[in-house]
Image (spheres, rainbow, N blue to C red):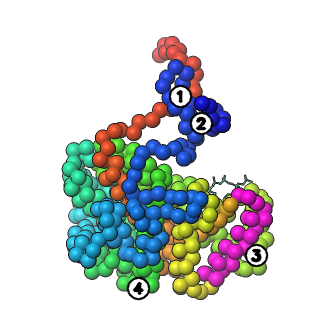
């Protein structure tokens, strides 16, 4: 039976070959089964395994959620202690990586810490002797996943410091993941409010259904490659501005507006010019993004001029979008308050996307482990639209 999809919006197999029509961008296409997470865009709800991700962010630690995603269940006190004892020592930089990190940081300085993370993970994996997932037993895959995800914050903060002429700060095993992350970045032990706010942001961004970077890491996992190769692929996808590469832009918008009296004319002029207001709209949510609601609460817990200004901007943007773009269901997305919260916790803007990547590395790892249990390689097809074939190869 034919569908209402027009050919230009679909991928159609070449005449005579086997093929299935799917929407452009694979939008809405179910490509596998997962027990890890899902997003219900119409309800404004997403979950990690069987739990609301927002409730997890409100009630649990990042370590608990990491345990949930990789080991399948929330830990009890004994399991939590064992998990902490297992992961905290993994924060330390392996010696060969430590030796080359200054050169890596210098070489990637124009692009920032995210550009150094891929090479650093590849190097650490080679040093550890990481084997292809295809050749690795499940317990070893889990150990490799914990190794790689525990190392990410250390690499990112060390590279950031090196790129600013400072020495890396050694990780501390007595601090939580989130507190240690801020400590390694600034060299100061953060206050409990900052550590908890960043922890809540990290938990809220661990996973989010079958997004582009998750799919990418799973495609690589389906080839049986090693876990670091899958993570590096996920990183590449995340770095794009249509995915994770733009969380500082909403904060830049607040800066550009500047003062409350400029909100209305500034926003109105941009929307009328056809521009997108950063931090609003979402490809899946047709309601408020639940992450935005939670992060607004976190920001309001800090209070202060920036938060009051952000709340005022949000209120006016929503009103103007409803007036000028009626029926589009444009609501606040995760990016709007994520930038505000990270700023309030002392993170510089160039660390916003790396911080997102650190959280998402946990989600990618869980997805990689899940994909590795399926021996089927992901290998779709494309419709050839080039010159008619075959044509004779011209003489050299
Ligand atoms: C996230 C985003 C790409 C989702 O896009 P989408 O669901 O595919 O929405 P569409 O591109 O179909 O847009 C639908 C309509 O709303 C408008 N629109 C969408 N987001 C808008 C925004 N942030 N500001 C102003 N108008 C917006 C579009 O211009 C379009 O208008 P039209 O119907 O007159 O052409 C889009 O909302 C956006 O660019 N937002 C700003 C960037 C951002 O915050 N990104 C982080 C996402 S987590």
SS at circle 2:
strand
- Residue 192 tag number: 4
State the separation of the CA atoms marked 4 and 1: 56 Å
x, y percentage for residue 85?
22, 73
Q: Mark 1 points at which residue?
A: 13
Q: Which of marks 4 and 3 is nearer the N terminus?
A: 4
Q: Which of marks 4 and 1 is nearer the N terminus?
A: 1
Q: Does 56 appear in magenta?
A: no
Q: Local crowd at mark 4 within 10 Å, few (<14), some, or many (≥20)?
A: few
Residue at 67 percent of width and 62 percent of height: 330
x, y percentage for residue 260?
73, 80
Residue 338 visible in the snapshot: yes
SS at circle 1:
loop
Residue at 55 percent of width and 43 percent of height: 25
- Residue 246 tag number: none
Q: Quadrant of the N terminus?
A: top right
Q: Local crowd at mark 2 within 10 Å, few (<14), some, or many (≥20)?
A: some
- The image quadrant that residue 187 belongs to is bottom left
- Residue 262 tag number: 3
Q: Do the residues labelled 4 and 3 touch (CB within 8 Å)?
A: no
Q: Earlier in the sequence, mark 2 or mark 4?
A: 2
Residue at 53 percent of width and 28 percent of height: 13
211 or 113: which is nearer to us?
211
Q: Name the residue under label 2.
A: 10
386 or 17: which is nearer to us?
17
State the separation of the CA atoms marked 1 and 2: 10 Å
Relative vertical location of residue 350 with respect to residue 10 in this rendering, above or below: below
Q: Are marks 3 and 2 in contact (CB under 8 Å)?
A: no
Cβ of mark 2 under 8 Å from ligand 1: the answer is no
Q: Local crowd at mark 1 within 10 Å, few (<14), some, or many (≥20)?
A: some
Instruction: Point out the stretch of residues depicted in magenta.
Output: 306-328
């Amino acid at each position: 039976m034919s569908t209402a999809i027009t050919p230009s919006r679909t991928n159609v197999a070449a005449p005579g070959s086997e093929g299935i029509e799917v929407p452009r961008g694979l939008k809405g296409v179910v490509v596998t089964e997962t027990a890890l997470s899902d997003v219900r865009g119409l309800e404004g709800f997403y979950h990690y395994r069987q739990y609301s991700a927002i409730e997890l962010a409100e009630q649990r630690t990042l370590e608990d959620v990491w345990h949930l995603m990789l080991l399948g269940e929330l830990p009890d006190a004994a399991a939590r202690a064992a998990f902490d004892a297992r992961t905290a020592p993994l924060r330390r930089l392996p010696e060969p990586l430590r030796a080359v990190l200054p050169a890596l940081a210098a070489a990637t300085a124009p692009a920032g810490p995210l550009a150094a993370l891929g090479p650093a993970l590849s190097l650490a994996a080679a040093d550890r002797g990481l084997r292809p997932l295809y050749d690795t037993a499940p317990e070893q895959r889990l150990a490799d996943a914990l190794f790689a995800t525990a190392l990410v914050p250390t690499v990112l903060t060390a590279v950031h410091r090196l790129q600013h002429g400072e020495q890396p700060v050694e990780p501390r095993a007595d601090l939580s993941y989130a507190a240690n992350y801020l400590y390694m970045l600034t060299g100061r032990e953060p206050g409990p409010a900052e550590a908890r706010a960043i922890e809540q942001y990290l938990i809220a961004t661990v996973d989010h259904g079958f997004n582009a970077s998750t799919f990418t890491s799973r495609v690589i996992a389906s080839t049986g490659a090693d876990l670091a190769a899958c993570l590096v692929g996920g990183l590449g996808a995340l770095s794009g501005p249509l995915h994770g590469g733009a969380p500082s832009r909403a904060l830049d918008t607040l800066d550009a507006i500047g003062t409350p009296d400029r909100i209305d004319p500034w926003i109105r002029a941009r929307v009328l010019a056809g521009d997108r207001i950063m931090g609003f709209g979402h490809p899946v949510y047709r309601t408020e993004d639940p992450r935005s609601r939670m992060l607004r609460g976190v920001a309001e817990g800090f209070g202060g001029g920036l938060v009051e200004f952000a709340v005022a901007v949000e209120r006016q943007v929503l009103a103007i979008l409803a007036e000028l773009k009626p029926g589009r269901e444009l609501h606040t997305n995760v990016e709007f308050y994520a930038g505000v919260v990270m700023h309030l916790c002392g993170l510089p803007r160039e660390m916003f996307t790396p911080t997102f990547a650190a959280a998402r590395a946990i989600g990618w790892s869980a997805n990689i482990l899940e994909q590795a249990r399926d021996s089927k390689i992901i290998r779709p097809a494309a419709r050839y639209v080039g010159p008619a074939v075959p044509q004779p190869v011209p003489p050299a």
